[in-house]
Structures are given as structure tokens and as C-alpha cells.
């Protein structure tokens, strides 16, 4: 590293931005001063004035990335991934088929003309039967 970074950190300490010898902390050396230094006359501190531990207690010795243990990422099982893929494929294929049929690119056989209505009525029948059980009887 160049010498100018030490001077820049000393100037930050002199102006009150830092309150310790950051350059010595980075290099792992004994600090030259604690608090804002006098930039013209920086006397070395006695060992008795130094705190026993100049680094924060949880600081790693080297720069490292430690991932969090309790990650919020959900790992889905394979059967869910496959089911979603099949469903998405069927939906996209159905949308493409419906678009092609509506534009007249594909002609359906005459037996398929009322298929949508038949399927809808088949799906709707159990729901209408259940709904009829909840209807109120006419009051006399």
C-alpha cells in the first residue's frame, strides 16, 4: 500500500472522524495514539495507556464471508418442481392451442364444438347440487 492512506487515516483522526489510530489497527501494530492526534507532534503512547485489546472482540482475523446459518431460501422437493413444470407446460400449451383455434389456424372436429360447454357443466353440477342444499325453504 502507498504511504498516503496512512496520512489520510491520520487526517480523519485529526478532524474527529476517527478516534483511534486506524492505520495501526489495520496493520495489526500498536497504536501510536488514541483520540485525535496532534498532527505536528504525535508522541508515542506508553504501553500502560493502551487498552488490553485494541480490536473489537468479534472481528475476524482476515476478510472473509460467512453465510448465515438460518437462510430464508426455501428448498422445494423434486416432486413439487416437476408438478409445477408439468402444470406450466400444460397451461402454455393450452393457451397456444386456444389462440390457434380462435384464429382459425386449427379446425376442430364437429364432435369437439360443444366440448367446452359440456366440461363446464360437468364441473358446475356438484357445486350447484351443494348450493341447492343451503337454499332456504320458502316461509309460509
Image: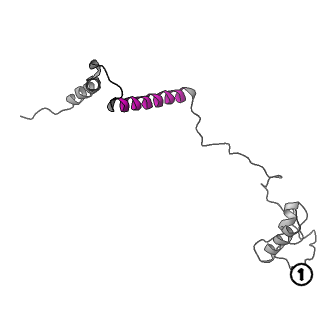
**Residue 19 in magenta stretch:** no
For label 1, the residue is 40
Q: How many numbered badges does the structure rendering display?
A: 1
Q: Position of residue 92 (x, y in %)?
A: 44, 32
Q: Residues within 10 Å of mark 1 (few under 14, many from 20)?
A: few
In the image, the segment drawn in magenta is: 79-100
Viewer can see residue 127: yes
Viewer can see residue 53: no
Residue 97 sits in which quadrant? top left
Q: Quadrant of the N terminus?
A: bottom right
In the rendered view, tell whether residue 24 sits above or below residue 107: below
* Residue at horizontal 32 percent and vertical 32 percent from the top: 102
Q: Quadrant of the C terminus?
A: top left
Q: Position of residue 87 (x, y in %)?
A: 46, 29
Residue 94 sits in which quadrant? top left
Q: Is residue 105 left or right of residue 14?
A: left
Q: Position of residue 57 (x, y in %)?
A: 79, 56
Task: Identify which residue, 10 or 90, lies in the foreground.
Answer: 90
Element type at mark 1: loop
Amino acid at each position: 500500500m502507498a504511504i498516503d492512506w496512512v496520512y489520510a487515516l491520520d487526517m480523519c483522526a485529526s478532524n474527529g472522524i476517527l478516534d483511534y489510530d486506524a492505520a495501526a489497527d489495520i496493520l495489526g501494530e500498536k497504536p501510536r495514539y488514541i483520540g485525535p492526534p496532534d498532527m505536528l507532534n504525535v508522541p508515542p503512547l506508553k504501553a500502560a495507556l493502551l487498552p488490553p485489546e485494541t480490536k473489537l472482540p468479534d472481528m475476524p482475523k482476515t476478510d472473509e464471508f460467512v453465510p448465515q446459518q438460518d437462510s430464508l431460501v426455501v428448498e422445494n422437493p423434486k416432486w413439487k418442481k416437476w408438478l409445477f413444470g408439468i402444470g406450466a407446460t400444460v397451461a402454455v400449451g393450452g393457451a397456444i392451442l386456444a389462440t390457434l383455434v380462435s384464429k382459425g389456424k386449427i379446425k376442430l372436429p364437429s364432435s369437439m364444438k360443444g366440448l367446452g360447454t359440456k366440461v363446464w357443466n360437468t364441473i358446475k353440477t356438484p357445486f350447484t347440487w351443494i348450493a341447492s342444499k343451503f337454499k332456504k325453504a320458502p316461509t309460509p
